[in-house]
Amino acid sequence: MPVSVDAAAGAGYPVGMPRDLPEALPRAKDRPAERVAKMRPFLTMQLAERAFELQREGAEIAHLGLGEPDFPAPEAAIRACAEALLERPARYEESAGLPALRRAIAADLEQRFGAKVSADRVLVTPGTSPAMLLAFSLLLEPGDEVIYATPHYPCYPNFIRYCGGVPVPVPTAPENGWKLDPERVARVTGPKTRAIIVGSPANPTGAVQDRATLERLSELGVPLVSDEVYDGLVYDGCEATSALGLGDRHFVVDGFSKRYAMTGFRLGWLVVPEWAVAPARIALQNLFISANGFVQRAGVAALASGAESLAAMRADFAKRRLRLVEGLRDLGFEVQRPPDGAFYVFAGARRFGGDSLALARALLERAFVNVAPGCDFGEAGEGYLRFSFAVRETTLETALERMARVLPELEVAGAAGGSQ
């Protein structure tokens, strides 16, 4: 399906699909429900799928688009998963998750943050996206508002709308490391505000919010939905603060994908307040039944033995981060400072034109380098590209060399387009 760029929303939108469904008109049988029709496409995934298609045709793609560590999962996790499949039948498990895994997650949270969390408040999900969807299902009634920093993870507003809520983005800027300003958040907080999303470290910017910022956000009296899936991937002495240390009314989304290089295992968790435990379990029973048991046993093993592999991965990422920043600057991209966390560089690309989706497509089709377009991360992300450094150094060097060959032509084209 061809894709256009919705300038108002700052994200691509499928051509031919209505942005708003008229209230007065009956819905045709072949028209999707409004909650799906209003979803913006995940452009990063669309470009990745095109990259896989080119790969099947024989092209060698330098993948810097998806957020997926190139490291293997912890050996103990792989072994535990295989043994679970061999030694016991793959059956339904408790909807809230294996008690052993929930206890291990609670112990890990106490070790990392000093937060004492009852295992009853930990709910295991088949990935972190279901955990986020579960949180908003618990929180939102139609018309409720959710505030979040932008540029943002593309799925945040889609999840909010899907659950009947209204997304309220608060712009951030590269000059201060894309940090969220609590005063700007306070100005848009009102009686309809039901939650504030905090991603720290953040995708796509790598921003890490300090404790003082989170404390001021918590004082607004609104539950935080804290996306902590990149916790542990921080650099230059930065430390991330968990919302768990700010009170018991907040929600924490986390998982194994990034910290333990287990993206394909699809294993996450949600920590909820006491009031939400019973309804969340009912929602889990109906929506997901349970996460795979053999994958949950891999999670137990990862928590027990994954610290060493995380340290090695973080050390390598720290070096790759600096090399990518240096290489992008040499190519003419604008990077004001290296990211504090996660494994992305969000680089200004306006000298190559104002359409980040067109630029990302050109780099894929002409240089065989897959990157994420900034417009996928909200209106504030237009004019940027997101590059992942969770790839081998040889892949980084290949990508930089290929882009060096095609970017001068794209820069001329971008300048010509901008002068019209």
Image: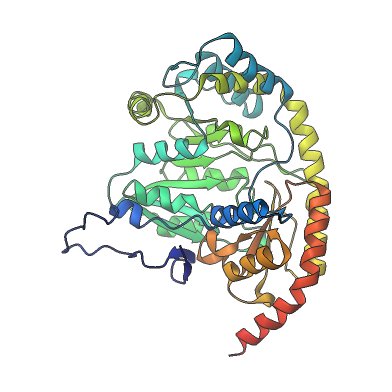
Q: In the rendered image of this protein, does residue 358 appear above or below residue 256?
A: below
User: Residue at 47% of width from left, 56% of height from top?
Assistant: 185
Q: In the rendered image of this protein, does residue 153 appear above or below residue 132?
A: below
Q: In the rendered image of this protein, does residue 259 appear above or below residue 383?
A: above
Q: Position of residue 198 (x, y in %)?
A: 52, 46
Write down the quadrant of residue 298 in the picture: top right
Seen from this angle, which residue lies furthest bottom? 420
Q: Position of residue 376 (x, y in %)?
A: 53, 60
The image quadrant where one finds the C terminus is bottom right
Work out whether residue 372 or residue 176 is closer to the camera in this orientation and state it.
Answer: 372
- Color encoding of the figure: rainbow
Q: In the rendered image of this protein, does residue 69 appear above or below residue 413?
A: above
Seen from this angle, which residue lies furthest front? 57
Residue 206 at least partly seen: no
Residue 320 at least partly seen: yes
User: Residue at 79% of width from left, 52% of height from top?
Assistant: 395
Work out whether residue 227 or residue 182 is closer to the camera in this orientation and state it.
Answer: 227
The image quadrant where one finds the N terminus is bottom left
Q: Position of residue 95 (x, y in %)?
A: 41, 21
Count of marks overlaid on the render: 0
Work out whether residue 128 or residue 291 is closer to the camera in this orientation and state it.
Answer: 291
- Say whether residue 404 is left or right of residue 240: right
Seen from this angle, which residue lies furthest top? 87
Work out whether residue 90 or residue 176 is closer to the camera in this orientation and state it.
Answer: 90
- Say whether residue 127 is left or right of residue 234: left
Q: Position of residue 211 (x, y in %)?
A: 61, 42
